Image (spheres, rainbow, N blue to C red):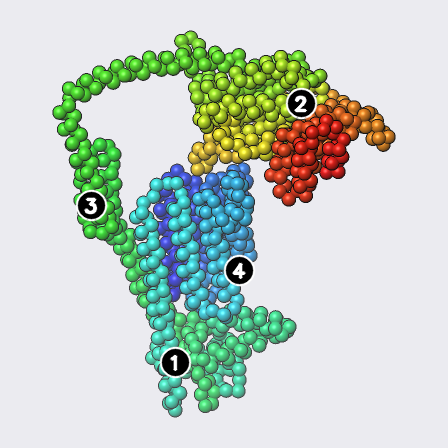
Amino acid sequence: MILLNANFFDRLTPTILTILLAGHMLLFVRNSRPALYLGGFFGFLSLFNIGYLLAFALDVPEGRYGFYIACCITLALVFKLQFAYHMPANRFPRESKVVLILSLLISLFAIAEYSYVAEQTPYRFFFDNHIYGSLYASPYVPLVTMIMFFGVMIIFLRQIRALGKANSQSFFQALFRPSHRNIVAVRSFLLIALAELIVNILYMISTVTDFVSALTINQIFNLGLMFVYFFYFIVYINHSRENTSIMVRLVGISLVTLLVATSLLGSRSIQRIEDSFDQKNRAAIQSMLTRDVPTLPPGAIYLASLPADRRYPDTYLEVTGSEWSAEALKDSDINRSDYLIEKRALKIIGEKQVSEEEALTRAREEILGKTRSQLQRDYRIAEDRRIVFYSAPTNTGWIEFGFPYEVFRREVHDSVLEYSALVLLLTFLLLVLFPFFFSSSLIRPLNSLLSGVKQVNEGDLTVHVPVQVEDEIGFLARSFNSMVRSVQDARQRLQQYAENLEQMVEARTRELSETNDALHEAKSRQDGDYFLTSLLLTPLVHNETANGLVHVEFLLKQKKEFAFKKWKSEIGGDYCVADRFQLGQRTYTVFLNADAMGKSIQGGGGILVLGSLFKAILHRSRSASALQRYSPERWLKTSFEEMNSVFRAFDGSMLISFVLGLIDEATGVVYCISAEHPAPVIYEDGKARFLDISDQLMKLGTPADARRLRVQVFRLLPEQLLILGSDGRDDIIVETESGPQMNTSEKPFLDIVERSQGDLSRIYEILQATGEITDDLSLMSIGFDGQAPDYRTVTGQLKEAIAAEDWSLAAILSMRRVSLIPEDTEFLLSASRACRKGDRITEAIDLGERLLLRAPERSDNLRHLVRLYLISRDFRRARELIQELENANPGEPSLPALRAALEAAAGTASDDDTDMVASVGDI
């Protein structure tokens, strides 16, 4: 027998929604795993809701089988787990397959276990929900459901973590400030799953408390789930890559609004019908109390009374108008209060710490007494027949009368059937009429406008988009038509001009043909220029370090490649050179890695000038005895100043970044300067790190460079490699999720050096595999095969000479120690002072100047150099150094004394320096 109730109506709207969502995801969204799993989730969710609809609709024992169907909620969550794995992409493929198999087996077990045990267990009619159901409550179905709920949330959190890592975000940054649309989508699904969990938890709490009425919690539960399911759908539609229509969103939002409104209005109306039924029967029992002899109300099947001094329903004194005896009513089942009694008993056990039996007794007295005093509708089963009854107190006791339960159910059934039919009809009309209305007022005008845009893109300027409605779309259509007319007018004017000048066009065509021939000839000449320039550059790029302890390798790959006749070559602005020459008694390896402004012929021209100039500097350094007496620091400074003066003549139109250095082949000590060139890399024991080169110079040719030259000095160990490279090593276009992007970080190069183990050819291969190299590329690798000299003996001898104040010997030993460990910058000042005390003023000045080039900010060295130049009577240099000291430290306390000493020394006419030395000795 089909008798609908209020619970049926509350469950109807979520069922309609899930069926429609499942149909859309499975039928209209194709070739998408996430859509398939989300559709499966909605499909089994629809079976879950249909199971409850059957249970609420069938007023026969077979209605309990609806709960067997409702167990499909576990299968719905199996699909939801897979949706979490695959949205937006499956990052855990093996794990997802294992979870799919396990969750499916567990779900089928839970369904089979409940179905089997429930079938073996007696059933009963639950008046509270007006349904038949088994007395067996499976622990497995809710447990599996809860585990899968939390599993879905955990998978979403892991997806956020993986996506954040792929987009260089920490977990908490991705969770609270996502930078990618996929992270936003997964976070949205996580929040929806959390809301769904909260709704279910609130519903479970309401089943064991009286905080909210059953009607209210059912409405909150059903409406909450409707919004949750719709948000699942709309978030997926908004973030999926499949083509979707705005119609889906419009109709979907309208449908949810309709279902929510009809659900609220229908539920309240059905509740008022039940209230009206109760009020009518309460009025009937109140009218009986005013009569001397109570009579059976219309439709009632019995009238019973009981004494006031006995607890209801222990004793019935009289039963009239019925075939039942008082004993039958006494033994009947008061079903409605069972669940209230059980809940109250649990609360009493927690509050009073009494036994379960006593708690049930107290709860029964409270609930039944309260029920009777409020004249509420109650239920019982007497002799296998369901009864709805009402009771009220009289002067001598209590009186009650009852109706067949079917009377109440049929009265509710008629209203629920009407409202359910209305909801189905409105849903059908919305699905049919709304697309029609939206199509005529929105979709068709938009499609018409889009069709016009496509025709214009294809070259048809005769198109005219009809303005159907004067709204925003109508304004767009009118503006589009105006734009097309403007373009059409312009084309017509051009066509007229072309027709009138046909002969000129033919002449122009001939000119263009001739120009094209000239361009081909010019291209051939240009390739010839490239070829000749590359021939000039070839001897400038050389590596003459094969026989030394320092081994240098370099790789040069210019971006511009060309072919001239039978020759193929390349030209660009990157440059590498390595050579050997002597300074003093030491042999040095010189290296230069440079990158000129521009590519192809522009960069090649800059390198041609630089290479020629540097080759001339090397030739002069070998042949000029004066240059061979230079310290490495002074040679670097002189070479830079010479090259910079030449390139400044270009007035900024040719700038060059570079690293220039010398390596002492006896010690492995490196002296180098850098001008806005990428940082060198030290590779050692499988690890790569950047070499910190502070205070880099501006590029060669910069019109005004206020930076002070600073020479970097460090020792290159035999187990180390020094790797240089131009910015072509970093200018790589790499593929990302948002498309090709230019690399902006230097750190990936360190990883490439480590992966290649410092091999230049392997570095180039990895760079090519990483992305598109967009610039000229030059790489240089430098290693040292010698051993560091032992300076401990000299250090010991130096300490003894200083202790004995033998400054002549101390000066000699200091110079020897500097030659053994020249990277000890701190010792240079001590060595210079020892030379001064040993009357080796020239050597003292040289050491001080070397320290000045390494650490120009040191005030103590500047004061010391001023003193030395005063002694050597080089007053011009002394004045320059005093100015440098003032610029570096305006508050230097020794400045007045130094200026006074300079004026005194410059003003003396005596050749005897004794007094002058004494005047500066304490500065």
Give me the C-alpha separation between circle 1 and circle 3: 69 Å
Looking at the image, do the residues carrying marks 4 and 1 touch, with CB atoms under 8 Å apart? no
Residue type, mark 3 in image: Arg
Quadrant in which the C terminus is drawn: top right
Q: Which residue is mark 2?
A: 631
Tell me the tag on residue 282. Answer: 1
Label 2 residue SS: loop
Sequence order check: which comes first, mark 4 or mark 2?
Answer: 4
Residue type, mark 4 in image: Tyr
Give me the C-alpha separation between circle 4 and circle 2: 98 Å
Give me the C-alpha separation between circle 3 and circle 2: 80 Å
Eyeballing the image, is 774 above or below 417?
Answer: above
Sequence order check: which comes first, mark 2 or mark 1?
Answer: 1
Place of residue 108 in the rendered image (x, y in percent of width and height, measured from the top left)? 51, 48
Residue type, mark 1 in image: Arg
Looking at the image, do the residues carrying marks 3 and 2 touch, with CB atoms under 8 Å apart? no
Q: Does residue 509 appear in this view? A: yes
Label 1 residue SS: helix
Q: Is 270 situated left or right of 760 in this image?
A: left
Give me the C-alpha separation between circle 3 and circle 4: 69 Å
Quadrant in which the N terminus is drawn: bottom left
Q: Which residue is mark 4?
A: 136
Q: Which residue is mark 3?
A: 478
